[in-house]
């Protein structure tokens, strides 16, 4: 798994509940994938939050290459039915 320095130094530190395997799974089989205006790519996946067992949507943002993970967080605004 390729990551940016930002991911390693900020995301992992601020969000220790984000499991790296979830990030990899989001790249391999996302619920939805979409490009941002800056070229980065968003990937969403549904995961079981290890803290409380609830299902949540994780957004994983990669660089333009679609492989290098830059950010990951629970996305409260994700709507499943949107294409």
Image (cartoon, rainbow, N blue to C red):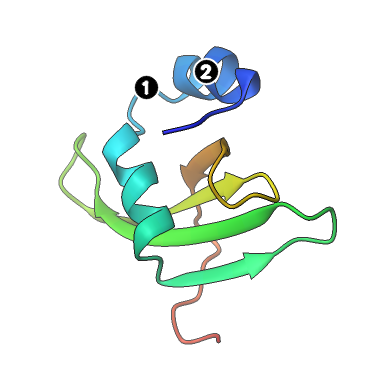
Percent from the top left, x then y, of residue 52?
Answer: 18, 40
Q: Nearer the viewer, residue 61 or 54?
A: 61
Residue 42, picture quadrant: bottom right
Q: Earlier in the sequence, mark 1 or mark 2?
A: 2
Which residue is the site of mark 1?
16
Instruction: Examine the rendered structure and indicate whether residue 15 appears above or below residue 74.
Output: above
Q: Nearer the viewer, residue 57 or 40?
A: 40
Quadrant including the N terminus:
top left
Disc 2 element: helix
Q: CA distance from mark 1 to mark 2?
A: 11 Å
Please rate how many residues cluster around mark 2, counting C-alpha atoms within 10 Å: few if below 14, some from 14 to 19, many from 20: few
Percent from the top left, x then y, of residue 12?
Answer: 46, 20
**Outermost residue toward the right in this view:** 37
Instruction: Using the rendered image of the protein, determine whether residue 57 is visible from the camera's viewpoint.
Output: no
Q: Residue at x 32, y 52 (%)?
A: 25
Horizontal relation, residue 17 to residue 32: left or right: left
Q: Residue at x 31, y 45 (%)?
A: 22
Q: Residue at x 36, y 59 (%)?
A: 28
Which residue is the site of mark 2?
8
Quadrant including the C terminus:
bottom right
The nearer-to-camera label among 1 and 2 is 2
């Amino acid at each position: 798994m390729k990551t940016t320095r930002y991911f390693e130094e900020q995301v992992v530190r601020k969000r220790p509940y984000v499991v790296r395997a979830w990030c990899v799974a989001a790249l391999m089989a996302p619920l939805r994938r979409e490009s941002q205006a800056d070229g980065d790519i968003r990937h969403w996946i549904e995961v079981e939050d290890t803290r409380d067992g609830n299902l949540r949507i994780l957004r994983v943002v990669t660089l333009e290459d679609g492989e290098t993970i830059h950010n990951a967080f629970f996305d409260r605004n994700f709507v499943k039915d949107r294409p």
